[in-house]
Image (cartoon, helix red, strand yellow):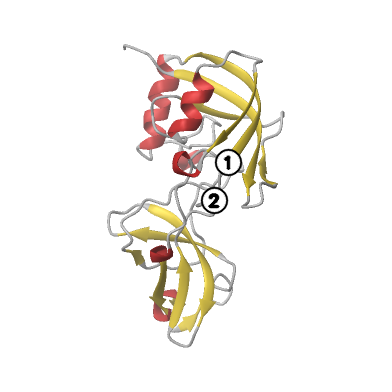
Amino acid sequence: MDNKHKYINVVYQLYAIDEDGKKHLMEKVEEDRPFFFISGFGTTLDAFEKYIEKLDTNEEFDFTLPVEEAYGKYEEAHVVDMDREIFTINNHFDHEHIFKGAMVPLQNEDGNHFWGRVIDITDEKVRMDLNHPLAGKPLNFKGHIVENRDATEDEVRHMIKILSGEACGCGCGHDHGDCDCGHDHGDCDCGHDHGDCDCGHDHDDCGCGHHH
């Protein structure tokens, strides 16, 4: 196998920068649970990966991605009204999971999973914001490289399994069927399928600089 992939382990703080230039901490990756990824698979923001990939083990970083290299502009067109009946179980509205401010797992026509935020509920509709939570904001990453080395063939194969849904994506090394790592793997436990999104965009990212 011609292996040009890097195994990269990082610890960082992620800050969103508001219109006044103030930084707001959005995520903190601790030393005891660093974030790892293998380059070349599109599992992180492209600009984040390009910057990190060239750094050496133990090297520190502090860089800011502009909006266009992060999650893009905030689009009003991505605020949509969905039929209330989509969020019913046995003819009863799912008040436990669907409320103002709730993050709800959704799926579009292509089978891509993403999240929407409930911003309003009426007698007939649920208004969802399908923009990424960090859309429209520059992102500042500050931290250091725990490890940066060539990925092994086994690690590359395991990443391929993760991307195909055959293995757990948390780095624990287990397959989905017997994973006891204690991580949430993105499954919704609300008991029903949610409506399809027709915005044409993928919303796989959670805002932390990498995909889950």
Residue 56 coordinates in the image, percent (x, y): 58, 13
Horizontally, is 118 left or right of 91 in the view? right
Q: Residue at x 37, y 59 (%)?
A: 107
Q: Residue at x 43, y 84 (%)?
A: 91
Q: Amino acid at mark 2?
A: Leu
Q: CA distance from mark 2 to mark 1?
A: 8 Å
Foreground pick, 96 / 14: 14
Q: Helix or strand or loop: what does disc 2 sit on?
A: loop
Quadrant showing the N terminus: top left
Foreground pick, 89 / 106: 106
Quadrant of residue 87 in the image?
A: bottom left
Q: Helix or strand or loop: what does disc 1 sit on?
A: strand
**Residue 90 visible in the shown view:** no
Q: Residues within 10 Å of mark 1 (few under 14, many from 20)?
A: many
Residue where numbered disc 1 is placed: 139
**Residue 62 visible in the shown view:** yes
Residue 165 coordinates in the image, percent (x, y): 38, 40
The disc label shown at residue 9, or none: none
Work out whether mark 2 precedes mark 1 in sequence or the reverse, and give the earlier one.
2
Residue 51 coordinates in the image, percent (x, y): 51, 24
Asked if the residue at tag 1 contacts the one at tag 2, i.e. Cβ–Cβ closer than 8 Å, the answer is yes
Instruction: Check the image and report above or below for 74 versus 178.
Output: below
Residue where numbered disc 2 is placed: 134
Q: Residues within 10 Å of mark 2 (few under 14, many from 20)?
A: many
Foreground pick, 44 / 151: 44
Residue 88 coordinates in the image, percent (x, y): 45, 78
Q: Residue at x 43, y 86 (%)?
A: 124
Residue found at the far left of this picture: 110
Instruction: Check the image and report above or below for 116 versus 13.
Output: below
